[in-house]
Image: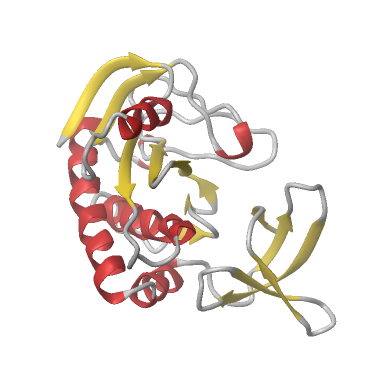
Amino acid sequence: MIRTVAETGSTNADMIALARSGVEEGVWLRAERQTQGRGRHGRGWSSPTGNLYASTIVRLRASDPPAPTLALVAAVALEECVSAYLKREALRLKWPNDLLLDGAKLSGILLERADAAVVIGIGVNLADRPDLPDRRTTSLAEHGVTVDPAEIVETLAATFARWIGRWRGEGLAPVRARWLERAHPPGTALSAASAEGGTVEGLFDGLDRDGALILRLADGTRRVIHAGDVFLL
């Protein structure tokens, strides 16, 4: 079920409140506009009318794979959804869950815990894009693609539900395989910045079995990155 509101502060904040009030898994909340949209690490998320701002909830079960791997589930579902409107090899995933178009950021995904549930917020630049100081951004409109947010959220909800079913029924392996298939190629130069301020540079060397990023450093050693911001070099 998809609920739509004209304006709200943050669909993630609203969904967290709904999660704690007992809303069932599978519900989506979409806003035409957000006044307090947010990204990872508390960053603001520009939210003009015309783009997609939507959140959903996954209620965790004891038999589920680790909750952080839902970032990969959301990423592969979003990439498949957008690919239905823009069939281009230029559409690529960047760890952990950014979707890039011609190397520029097209979307963002934010996971937040709400007791025994995870709220997943997804923003996609459909009609407009923000100017960010640290990375290039783009929109589907800049590539000649016009998509109604109300339409794409229907596609996304169905795609996400299917990938959640695979995640629960088959484990992380098929999700990880799909993510690697749609990511930038091995050997891509990356920089990973931790929340504490340290930075490490290396070449993309895949994901470990739990979905963490592997970088091959200049000295030939491999570094496993479990959290942080990653940039293409």
| Position of 28 relative to 87 (above/below) | above
The colour style of the image is: secondary structure
| Position of 226 relative to 124 (above/below) | below
* 33 horizontally vs 190: left or right: left
Going by the picture, which residue comes out furthest to the bottom?
220
* 111 horizontally vs 127: left or right: right
Residue 77 at x, y percent in the picture: 31, 56
Residue drawn at (39%, 32%), measured in percent from left and top? 16
Residue drawn at (80%, 56%), measured in percent from left and top? 199
Which image quadrant: the N terminus? top left
| Position of 204 relative to 75 (above/below) | below
Residue drawn at (72%, 59%), measured in percent from left and top? 191
Residue 140, visible in the rendered structure: yes
* 5 horizontally vs 45: left or right: left
Residue 8 at x, y percent in the picture: 37, 16
Residue 37 at x, y percent in the picture: 48, 25
Which image quadrant: the C terminus? bottom right
Residue 7 or residue 93, whichever sits in front: 7
Residue 91, visible in the rendered structure: no
- Total numbered badges shown on the rendered structure: 0
| Position of 178 relative to 21 (above/below) | below
* 207 horizontally vs 85: left or right: right
Residue 159 or residue 42, whichever sits in front: 42
Residue 210 at x, y percent in the picture: 51, 72
Q: In which quarter of the image is residue 120?
A: top left
Residue 13 or residue 140, whichever sits in front: 13
